[in-house]
Amino acid sequence: MRIVVNELHHTYPAGVEALRGISLVIEAGEQVAMVGQNGAGKTTLVKHFNGLLQPTQGSVHIGDWDTREHAVSQLAARVGYVFQNPDEQLFTKNVHDEVAFGPRNLGYSPERIERLVEDALALTELTDKKETNPYDLSSTWRKMVALASIISMDTPVVIFDEPTTGQDAANIARIANVVRVLRERGKTVITITHDIDFCAENFERIIALAQGRVLLDGPANDVLAEDELLATTYVDPPQLTRLGKRLGLPVTVRDEEQFLAAYREFIGTEK
């Protein structure tokens, strides 16, 4: 589902101008990471996608819907939002009911609800925990419950707000797998993240924000090559990207596979 942002401004009641004329298009099925220092406007921007915030000026369209003309409850059928802190989402007595709440609230049939719940539980490796109270789980697994509760809604757009914060390596790998599967299913996946390695390894497009404006927007390799501009947003490219540049590799790399391929070619050329 296509997202179109046109000259979007947002000023909070206290007078803070958080967004200053952002225009961009996110095509259906794109995987987009938004980076930038705290206060850059990342969360403010994506909260316009599901109606949690409304434009002060400009517009946001999710498919053929103008967000100003639809309630949050309606937009929830198109945009799923996984909050940074899972404890802001979880409220039922067991994992199964938590994951079933979203699709049930959207009015899906009982058969579809159960099918979606079982799929979301399997994808997030929660099947054996479905009878457990979410608050009896570790914070790592509560994060997965929050993910599952949004995945089960089967929305065409899924937003992850800082999905890897506080997570160990095993759970980051689980989250990366969720992103991969959603991509294979044709979902639009948007993440807000300070984890530049997770961003580089799992997202093909990066949007860097600074002071409420888009500073950089493009293919991940191209954006990561702009290390001086990224530095103004307090974002450093991944270690492999920086290492490749210091070695004089002719292309920008962002993961191990790209680094090794470029290094082999570079060594062969040097010979």
Image (cartoon, rainbow, N blue to C red):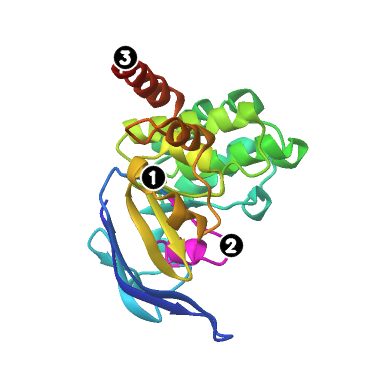
Magenta-tinted stretch: 34-51
Q: Does 108 appear above or below 59?
A: above
Counting residues from the start of the chain, the first of labels 1 and 2 encountered is 2
Q: Is residue 201 magenta?
A: no
In the image, taking residue 93 as reference, residue 202 lies left or right, namely left
Circle 3 sits on which residue? 268
Q: Distance between the Cα atoms at labels 3 and 1?
A: 23 Å
Circle 1 sits on which residue? 225
Name the kind of residue labelled 1 in the image: Ala
Circle 2 sits on which residue? 38
As helix, strand or loop, the secondary structure at mark 1 comes to: loop
Q: Is residue 182 visible?
A: yes
Q: Residue at x 58, y 32 (%)?
A: 172
As helix, strand or loop, the secondary structure at mark 2 comes to: loop
Q: Residue lying at the far right in this picture: please name it.
A: 136
As helix, strand or loop, the secondary structure at mark 3 comes to: helix
Picture coordinates of residue 203, whole percent (x, y): 40, 40
Give the position of the C terminus as an image quadrant.
Answer: top left
Residue 3 in which image quadrant: bottom left
Q: Residue at x 47, y 41 (%)?
A: 199
Q: Nearer the viewer, mark 3 or mark 1?
A: 3
